[in-house]
Structure formats: structure tokens, C-alpha cells
């Protein structure tokens, strides 16, 4: 008897031809692979640009936080996070109508009704002094001061006190505010001062002979770098002077963020701004992502030993060499105190 022949299988061709996908199918496969690789690269790039995230879950119930420039951008997101942790949040803003709307939104999104708005114009020594007086009269503690407000690369505007606007708002206003609130910061256990600086401090220079560009051609970029370097040097000197007082000071680079801060740059180059708007969605941090290092410096336990240091992406990093100049930091402190009329400093 003959053995049964093995069962055979009938292989049918793919609809439209044989097993070879042909030139068209190969192109489709290649394009699909390219799209897939591109999407993966985009996701990886976005994750890298987003940077560090503050994963600390510390609550702030019973604590008071003051944030300047809090009605938009990373200031608003900082307020939202800290309010969500139960803190009493004071939003210090120049534009009260926008601040009121932002505060309402934060109250609704966090369920924390203890969010208040107060007027503060950092370009005015009088406004800063009045704000500090009212704050000291009405508040019994200050756990966290976030000096967040700022202007970036604006035209050469002069404040009512005769100061160039970028150094006035970004540094001198916050310098005065911090010093005036120090009694309350010192009386509050383990309080913190957080200065929002920028990587732009690299390459910056404090021109003590011409801080306001009165004798040299005005450069919006040089002025901005000078003001951001001032933030780093102020933090360094403040930490040195407050050593042992229970008050810590930190400065940080929040990242390159999609906020209104760059509106002056877009005003100069509107076509460039329009062209960059789409890439900015990919290459810039969102305000929430940009607020994470501020929040980290505000709530992370055990940072007191790092007072005076510079942070980026929720981690300590090294400031530029010009930001580690102790002599420049001391000189800037003394000059700043003279300019704002502050006689008693820490």
C-alpha cells in the first residue's frame, strides 16, 4: 500500500498582484517607516525639551506664598500648583483686571478659595514700598516669596525713578521687595526666596559705570542679560547674608517657554514671529512645564543646604562663571541699595 501524500496548502496571492509589493507598495512602506521614526523622534524631543517635573507631593496648608507677575505664564501656573497644595497664595500683579480673572480661574481649578490679588508695579519704588508696607500690616507670615515677574528685551524705557526698565523690573524692584519683606521672612520658620533668572545670564555683564545705558548705545539683549545676571548675583549675596537666619534663597532657569514675555521681540520682527510660531509648539516649554523648577525650589524638602545655588530642570546646576563672582555680588548689592534708597539691609 502506498503512503498517503502529505496534505498540500494553496497559497493565494495578495490582492492586486503576487507576493512582491511592487514599487508602489515599497514606497508606501518606506514612507510609513519614515513617519513612524519621525513621530518617535518628536515624542522623544518633546520629552527632553519639557525637562524635569517636580514630583514632590508636599502640602502647604497653613503657609503663605507671594508670587510676583502671577496673572499669566509660569507665574500663574506656579500659583495654581501652590494653591493646589493648600497654600494661601497672594498674587502680586501690575494689571489687576487680568489678575482677578486669573485668580478666579485658579480658585475654580484648585478648590482653594484662599487666593488673593494685590497691586504691585515693580517699575516703581513707591509702589514696591507701599505694597510691602500693606503686606506686613496684613499678613502674619511669609513662607515662600517667588520673584517671578519680568520683562524681556523691551525698548529703552525709563521708569519714574530714572531707571532703565529691564534692570528696574527684573532686579531692582525685586531687590527692594525682598529686603522690605525680610522681617516677615525671618520670623517665619524655614522660609524661602526664589528668583526666576534665565540661562541668558551667561555672557551677561554688570556695567556698574552705566547700568542704565545712559552713555552707551542701548542693546535690549545686553540689558536683559545684565538683569538676569543680577538675579543670580543677588541670590548669591542674599544667601550669604542670610546664612543661619532660617531663610534660604534660590535662583533658576525655567527654560525657553511659550509665554507673552517675548512679545517685544515679535514686535520687532513680526514675520519671524509668525514663522517661528509653529516650531515653537515643539521647541518651547509650556507654561506648566516652565513652572516646574520654581515649584521644585519652593516645596522640595532639604534644599536649605543649597541656599544661594542655581537650578534648572528641577536639579541644581552650575551658574556661569560671571554668576559666581562674590565681589560683583557684593558690589551689586551695595549699588542696588543706594539706587532704591534702602539704608537698612540684612
Image (cartoon, rainbow, N blue to C red):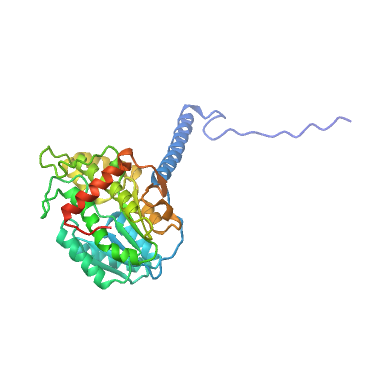
Residue found at x 22% / y 57%? 176
Residue 267 vs residue 109: left or right? Answer: left
Residue found at x 89% / y 30%? 1
Residue found at x 19% / y 40%? 207
* Residue 278 visible to an observer of this rendering: no
Residue 126 vs residue 137: left or right? Answer: left
Residue 218 vs residue 325: left or right? Answer: left
Where is residue 14? Give x, y as percent.
56, 34
Where is residue 57? Give x, y as percent.
46, 61
Vertical placement of 101 versus 237: above or below? below
**Figure quadrant of residue 161:** bottom left
Please tell me how many numbered marks the rendered image carries: 0
* Residue 192 visible to an observer of this rendering: yes
Identify the residue at the far right of this view: 1
Q: Quadrant of the C terminus?
A: bottom left
**Figure quadrant of residue 92:** bottom left
Most foreground residue, 293 or 104: 293
Residue found at x 43% / y 43%? 43
**Figure quadrant of residue 269:** top left
Where is residue 126? Give x, y as percent.
15, 61
Most foreground residue, 87 or 19: 87
Most foreground residue, 112 or 30: 112
Where is residue 258? Give x, y as percent.
29, 48
Amino acid at each position: 500500500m502506498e503512503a498517503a501524500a502529505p496534505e498540500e496548502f494553496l497559497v493565494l496571492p495578495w490582492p492586486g498582484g503576487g507576493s512582491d509589493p511592487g514599487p508602489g507598495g515599497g514606497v508606501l512602506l518606506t514612507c510609513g517607516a519614515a513617519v513612524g521614526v519621525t513621530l518617535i523622534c518628536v515624542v522623544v524631543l518633546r520629552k527632553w525639551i519639557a525637562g524635569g517635573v517636580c514630583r514632590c507631593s508636599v502640602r502647604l496648608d497653613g503657609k503663605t506664598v507671594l508670587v510676583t507677575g502671577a496673572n499669566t505664564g509660569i507665574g500663574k501656573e506656579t500659583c495654581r500648583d501652590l494653591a493646589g497644595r493648600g497654600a494661601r497664595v497672594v498674587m502680586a500683579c501690575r494689571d489687576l483686571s487680568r489678575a482677578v480673572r486669573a485668580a478666579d480661574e485658579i480658585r475654580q481649578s484648585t478648590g482653594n478659595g484662599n487666593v488673593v490679588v494685590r497691586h504691585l508695579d515693580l517699575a516703581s519704588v513707591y509702589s514696591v514700598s507701599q505694597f510691602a508696607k500693606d503686606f506686613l500690616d496684613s499678613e502674619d507670615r511669609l513662607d515662600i516669596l517667588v520673584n517671578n515677574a519680568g520683562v524681556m528685551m523691551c525698548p529703552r524705557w525709563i521708569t519714574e525713578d530714572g531707571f532703565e526698565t529691564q534692570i528696574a523690573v527684573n532686579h531692582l524692584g525685586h531687590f527692594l521687595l525682598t529686603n522690605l519683606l525680610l522681617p516677615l521672612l525671618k520670623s517665619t520658620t524655614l522660609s524661602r526666596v526664589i528668583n526666576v533668572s534665565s540661562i541668558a545670564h551667561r555672557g551677561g555683564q554688570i556695567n556698574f559705570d552705566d547700568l542704565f545705558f545712559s552713555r552707551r548705545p542701548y542693546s535690549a539683549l545686553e540689558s536683559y542679560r545684565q538683569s538676569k545676571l543680577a538675579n543670580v548675583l543677588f541670590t548669591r549675596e542674599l544667601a550669604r547674608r542670610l546664612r543661619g537666619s532660617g531663610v534660604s534663597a534660590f535662583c533658576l532657569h525655567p527654560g525657553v517657554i511659550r509665554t507673552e514675555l517675548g512679545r517685544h521681540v515679535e514686535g520687532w520682527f513680526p514675520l519671524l514671529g509668525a514663522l517661528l510660531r509653529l516650531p515653537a509648539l515643539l521647541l518651547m516649554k509650556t507654561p506648566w512645564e516652565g513652572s516646574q523648577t520654581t515649584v521644585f525650589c519652593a516645596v522640595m524638602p532639604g534644599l536649605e543646604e543649597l541656599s544661594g545655588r542655581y537650578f534648572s530642570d528641577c536639579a541644581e546646576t552650575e551658574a556661569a562663571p560671571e554668576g559666581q563672582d562674590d565681589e560683583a555680588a557684593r558690589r551689586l548689592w551695595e549699588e542696588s541699595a543706594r539706587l532704591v534708597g534702602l539704608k537698612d539691609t540684612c
